[in-house]
Amino acid sequence: GVSSLVRVTPSMLKFMNGRKDKETGKMKDVWSVYQGKVYNISPYLPYHPGGEGELRRAAGKDGTKLFMEVHPWVNWENMLGECMVGIFVSEEQPPT
Ligand code: HEM
């Protein structure tokens, strides 16, 4: 259920975004929010038909608006299932 998902705040998103990749040691992690869900889209970057740069415009942010402006028909939930990290929550959350 939803309660077992990692809860990611805006500051956590910014912190995780741009961290070094564990295997290569290169700066590459890109974390973005799409429709309230948080994704580490790093593995998908080389495969994006619109290019890596476009994806990076949504790095550390909510990319929903950009996404919907360009290709609302794309089913990102199917494509990014493996990359999902958790759900996006506001900064101050009472303990549950
Ligand atoms: C194209 C996936 C985020 C910009 C595409 C296409 C897919 C895709 C499947 C091909 C669509 C088609 O030909 O009908 C994704 C996924 C995203 C994402 C899974 C989220 C992780 C974004 C964002 C932007 C963007 C945030 C803009 C800032 C573009 C552009 C194209 C494109 C400009 C057109 C490329 C072309 O036809 O030359 N994307 N996209 N995408 N995407 Fe994304």
Image (spheres, helix red, strand yellow):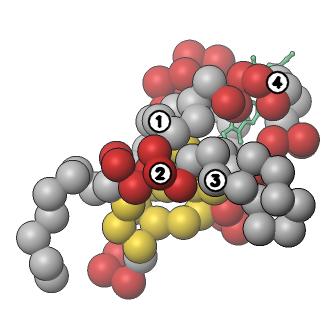
Name the N-terminal-most of marks 1 and 2.
Answer: 2
Q: CA distance from mark 1 to mark 4?
A: 18 Å
Judge the density around disc 2: few (<14), some (14-19), many (≥20) Cα neighbours within 10 Å.
few
Which label was assigned to residue 61?
1
**Disc 3 residue type?**
Arg
Name the N-terminal-most of marks 4 and 3.
Answer: 3
Q: Find disc 4 in the rendering and name its residue.
A: 50
Name the N-terminal-most of marks 1 and 3.
Answer: 3
Q: In what quadrant of the picture does the N terminus appear? A: bottom left
Q: Residue at 76% x, 59% y: name it.
A: 21
Judge the density around disc 4: few (<14), some (14-19), many (≥20) Cα neighbours within 10 Å.
few
Q: Residue at 67% x, 30% y: name it.
A: 56
Residues at marks 3 and 2 touching, judged by CB atoms closer than 8 Å: yes
Judge the density around disc 3: few (<14), some (14-19), many (≥20) Cα neighbours within 10 Å.
some
Residues at marks 1 and 4 touching, judged by CB atoms closer than 8 Å: no
**Disc 4 residue type?**
Gly
Q: CA distance from mark 1 to mark 3?
A: 15 Å
Residue extending furthest toward the front: 25
Secondary structure under tag 3 reads: loop
**Disc 2 residue type?**
Phe
Q: Find disc 2 in the rendering and name its residue.
A: 15
Secondary structure under tag 4 reads: loop
